[in-house]
Image (cartoon, rainbow, N blue to C red):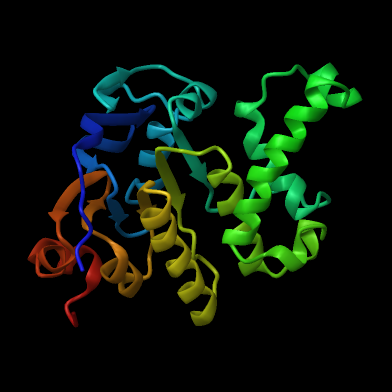
Amino acid sequence: MARRTGDVILDVRNLSLRFGGVKALTDITFDVREHEIRAIIGPNGAGKSSMLNCINGVYQPQDGSISLRGKTFRHMNSRQVAEMGVARTFQNLALFKGMSVLDNIMTGRNLKMRTNIFQQAIRWGAAEREETEQRIVVERIIDFLEIQPFRKTPVGRLPYGLQKRVDLGRALAMEPQVLLLDEPMAGMNVEEKQDMSRFILDVNDEFGTTIVLIEHDMSVVMDISDRVVVLDYGKKIGDGKPDEVRANPEVISAYLGTSH
């Protein structure tokens, strides 16, 4: 059953990104609607991660604009973008391997903290009450992601698939309006991919979170995405519903292969 999507929440217009003489992105335009799962696909080096890095403030594009709920932002850093309601997971896990699952996900609540670092360190008064409140939120996320047995386990001891789930949990702890997922299923086996697909659909459905997803597994993309934008050598070569993209001759030639 098709999901109900709302108004445009994220609007990318004529975006171009260069590193010296190398063009990473050239004149890219697409939008993302509320409650949508929007996939970005393309071969290695197509510019997919560069696009996410522009959206969440890691890279500053030379041309074009990005708007969130109608507010255009330029030259913003990652924290400012996060404060606007955009969270991100990364292709290469950036978890604190020696810290527990619970403490890793707690780091995602940093933006919600009102007490300062000194108050948090001594855990007294308002800081102690605030930490208790934030832990309640984190425990709910742990339950949602079905990782309760590992809540006190150092993340470095967990299997790769569960570490990916913790990474998702940390992003969810920020309570984002838009969640950017950079290859959330890379390196997973079939069962782990099925689990992650289910969690992504549940996040979208139960939390109402809008999701922008980079993924190489085409069966996953076709199963869970509402619309797909296709990049190749930093240019947009396709945009539409999964079936439309799959039938696009230029996309077939560049990415899917003629056998499809």
Quadrant (top left, top right, bottom left, bottom right) of the N terminus: bottom left
Horizontal and vertical percent position of residue 21:
34, 30
| Residue found at x 49% / y 81% | 190
Horizontal and vertical percent position of residue 110:
66, 30
Horizontal and vertical percent position of residue 233:
27, 49
Q: Residue furthest right?
A: 122
- Count numbered badges in the picture: 0
Direction from residue 165 to residue 229 in the image, left or right: left
Res 129 visible: yes
From this view, report whether residue 82 is shown above or below residue 231. Answer: above
Quadrant (top left, top right, bottom left, bottom right) of the C terminus: bottom left
| Residue found at x 82% / y 57% | 152
Decide which of 42, 3 is in the foreground and name it.
Answer: 3
Q: Would you identify the image quadrant in which residue 117 lies?
A: top right
From this view, report whether residue 257 is shown above or below residue 16. Answer: below
Horizontal and vertical percent position of residue 7:
18, 37
From this view, report whether residue 124 is shown above or below residue 229. Answer: above
Q: Would you identify the image quadrant in which residue 14 lies?
A: top left
Decide which of 103, 114 is in the foreground and name it.
Answer: 114
| Residue found at x 69% / y 48% | 95
Res 164 visible: no
Direction from residue 2 to residue 134 in the image, left or right: right
| Residue found at x 20% / y 56% | 227
